């Protein structure tokens, strides 16, 4: 699909914004940013680039379907590599031809940064904003300095990232808040939604991930952990929120388990489950922030695919930043209050004891509950603005249109 031409000249012409998202989460951020830009900029705005359904609702005609590039994990990327490379060059050509006032790349660095580098080489006058920082504080810290060559402004979702980029020589970085802070009310229980612990049916959440690779690596171990827990706590209710594209697969697997697990589908059902739950066993990722915002103590698991497992073994030739945790609440708080289990450590026989303590009035549970109030304060924007409006203001400020 050809990019609609961005027309006009001079200061009175429409503001031209070229956006590139690489997966569904970026599509949501992009859509909110587009809406905020419309609210803050008094003139006409023309959008072009790559996005999904939400960005389409805000007026973006995507160059191609987001599904062409929304893949995760080395194995999946290799299988789609010819298509992904083709889409990179297609996007670069379209961005250079559009000659926008600003290029905004959104998350998915394996795709979006390859676009940004090539646009900078071919059209160095186009300002580039990166919305969502790669995890330079955890993997490949050298990327921060490399990014400073082709990124003019970085909008970070986590409060510690501006300092991390300053220390690592990255581009100018600004904390704009996490989208989650605008949805806290949906995650926190109203009167009567979360029963008092030990008074009635306690509720455990199983959250094996939102990507097929995560679910494949963690679901069976989560099921075995649930089986062991139910043998100790027969009245325990277990809920498993599933993303729609994996719900059928998860239901098929769970149906063969010797324990009753209720699979709920969709975001509204997921948040309703959060408002009822007392503890969670979850895959690593943004869900840990959602659980913390909801006040749910958790244990976090993650497994590396074969490539990154091998990389961990030979990390001396591939330096990583020194972080003592891969769990976002722990990193933000600066202390490891949420237990995490990597690879072989995520064994049901070990997890069951940890989760059982989180379902009791234990010191481990209380430590997490107390820490979550500190997390609220750390993530709050100081000016009280919304996350998307802060991001829009910084984009407009960069190009002199604030």
Image (cartoon, helix red, strand yellow):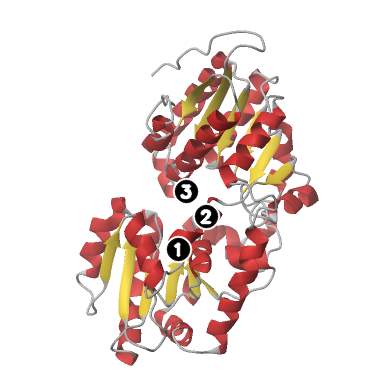
- CA–CA distance between discs 1 and 3? 33 Å
Relative side of 244 to 83, left or right:
left
Residue 298 in the image: above or below residue 19: below
Packing grade of label 1 (10 A; few <14, some 14-19, many >=20) is many
Residue 174 in the image: above or below residue 127: below
Q: Measured from the top left, where is residue 256 in percent x and y?
A: 20, 72
Residue for badge 2: 180
> Tag 2's secondary structure?
helix
Packing grade of label 3 (10 A; few <14, some 14-19, many >=20) is few
> Tag 1's secondary structure?
helix
Mark 2 in CB contact with mark 1 (< 8 angstroms): yes
Mark 3 in CB contact with mark 2 (< 8 angstroms): no
Determine if residue 331 is in view. Answer: no
Residue name at image x 40 percent, y 30 percent: 56
> Tag 3's secondary structure?
helix
Residue 387 in the image: above or below residue 395: below
Dot in front, 3 or 2: 2
Residue for badge 3: 74
**Residue reaching furthest to the bottom:** 232
- CA–CA distance between discs 2 and 1? 9 Å
Determine if residue 157 is in view. Answer: yes
Q: Measured from the top left, where is residue 314 in percent x and y?
A: 62, 60
| Number of on-image labels | 3
């Amino acid at each position: 699909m050809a990019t609609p031409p961005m027309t006009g000249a001079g200061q009175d012409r429409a503001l031209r914004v070229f956006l590139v998202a690489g997966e569904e989460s970026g599509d949501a951020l992009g859509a909110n940013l587009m809406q905020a830009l419309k609210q803050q900029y008094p003139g006409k705005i023309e959008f072009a680039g790559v996005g999904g359904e939400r960005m389409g609702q805000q007026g973006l005609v995507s160059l191609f379907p987001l599904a062409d590039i929304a893949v995760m994990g080395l194995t999946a990327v290799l299988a789609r590599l010819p298509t992904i490379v083709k889409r990179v060059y297609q996007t670069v050509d379209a961005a250079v031809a559009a000659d926008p006032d600003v290029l905004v790349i959104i998350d998915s660095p394996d795709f979006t940064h390859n676009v940004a580098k090539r646009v900078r080489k071919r059209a160095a006058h186009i300002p580039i904003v990166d919305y969502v920082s790669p995890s330079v504080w955890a993997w490949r810290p050298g990327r921060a300095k490399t990014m400073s060559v082709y990124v003019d402004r970085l909008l970070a979702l986590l409060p510690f990232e501006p300092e991390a980029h300053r220390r690592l020589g990255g581009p100018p970085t600004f904390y704009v808040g996490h989208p989650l802070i605008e949805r806290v009310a949906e995650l926190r229980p109203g009167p009567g939604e979360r029963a008092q612990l030990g008074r009635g049916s306690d509720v455990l959440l199983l959250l094996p991930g939102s990507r097929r690779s995560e679910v494949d690596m963690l679901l069976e171990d989560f099921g075995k952990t649930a089986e062991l827990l139910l043998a100790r706590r027969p009245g325990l209710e277990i809920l498993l929120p599933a993303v729609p594209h994996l719900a059928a697969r998860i239901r098929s697997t769970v149906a063969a388990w010797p324990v009753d697990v209720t699979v709920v589908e969709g975001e509204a059902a997921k948040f309703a489950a959060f408002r009822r739950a007392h503890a969670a066993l979850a895959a690593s990722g943004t869900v840990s922030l959602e659980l913390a915002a909801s006040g749910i103590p958790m244990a976090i698991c993650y497994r590396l695919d074969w490539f990154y497992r091998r990389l961990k073994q030979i990390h001396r030739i591939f330096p990583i930043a020194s972080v003592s945790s891969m769990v976002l609440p722990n990193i933000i708080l600066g202390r490891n209050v949420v237990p995490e289990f990597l690879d072989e450590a995520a064994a049901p026989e070990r997890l069951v004891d940890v989760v059982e303590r989180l379902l009791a009035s234990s010191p481990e549970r209380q430590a997490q509950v107390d820490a979550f109030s500190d997390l609220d304060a750390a993530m709050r924007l100081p000016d009280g603005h919304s996350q998307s409006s802060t991001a829009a203001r910084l984009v407009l400020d960069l190009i002199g249109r604030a």
